[in-house]
Image (cartoon, helix red, strand yellow):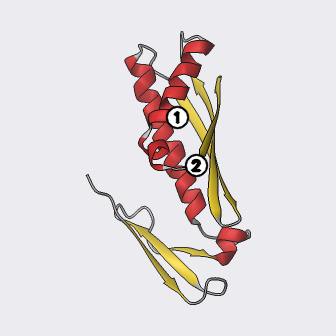
């Protein structure tokens, strides 16, 4: 399977602007710029897209792991914070809260750690990944 996205950038790094599009069409010429990346401008940026990818991938992997262990989850909420510091994406911090009937906190922590280590996005990222996992 191959998925694709495209980017177009026009102008200088600070004054220029760009658009991002995805093969699925979920993003179509979505605006990004210096202001959306380093300030609070309206639009997207690479870091929030990496965060969305990591949160989504981790949540799905955790669901597969829990279900295989006999604990199908009712709900998984994951937040991912990506740190960009001095021009380096250095950290992905996952915070997950899940409703999983009949599971112990210990079993849940094991499943969450497994998902953190083995979801495809975690494996693709070469940075520090932290995890805070809680049952609801």
Classify 10 Å Cα crowding around label 2: few (below 14), some (14-19), many (20 and above).
some
| Residue 112 visible in the shown view | yes
Residue 76: x %, y % from top left: 55, 31
Q: Quadrant of the C terminus?
A: top right
In primary-sequence order, the first of circles 1 and 2 is 1
* Above/below status of 135 relative to 7: above
Which quadrant of the structure image shows residue 25?
Answer: bottom left
Residue under the point 62% across and 58% down: 89
42 to the left or right of 58: right
Q: Secondary structure at mark 1?
A: helix
* Above/below status of 108 relative to 91: above
Residue 70: x %, y % from top left: 41, 13
Classify 10 Å Cα crowding around label 1: few (below 14), some (14-19), many (20 and above).
many
117 to the left or right of 129: left
Residue occupied by mark 2:
127
Which quadrant of the structure image shows residue 67?
Answer: top left
Which quadrant of the structure image shows residue 99?
Answer: top right
* Above/below status of 9 relative to 39: below
Task: Give the CA distance from mark 1 to mark 2.
Answer: 12 Å
Residue occupied by mark 1:
116
Q: Nearer the viewer, mark 1 or mark 2?
A: 2
115 to the left or right of 77: left
Residue extending furthest right? 39
């Amino acid at each position: 399977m191959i998925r694709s996205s495209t980017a177009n950038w026009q102008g200088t790094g600070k004054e220029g602007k760009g658009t991002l599009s995805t093969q699925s069409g979920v993003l179509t010429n979505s605006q990004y710029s210096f202001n959306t990346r380093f300030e609070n401008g309206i639009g997207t940026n690479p870091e929030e897209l990496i965060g969305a990818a990591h949160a989504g991938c981790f949540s799905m992997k955790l669901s597969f792991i829990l279900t295989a262990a006999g604990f199908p989850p009712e709900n998984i909420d994951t937040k991912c914070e990506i740190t960009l510091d001095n021009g380096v994406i250095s950290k992905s911090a996952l915070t997950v809260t899940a409703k999983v009937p009949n599971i112990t906190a210990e079993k849940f922590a094991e499943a969450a750690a497994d998902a953190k280590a083995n979801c495809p996005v975690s494996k693709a990222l070469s940075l520090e990944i932290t995890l805070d996992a809680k049952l609801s």
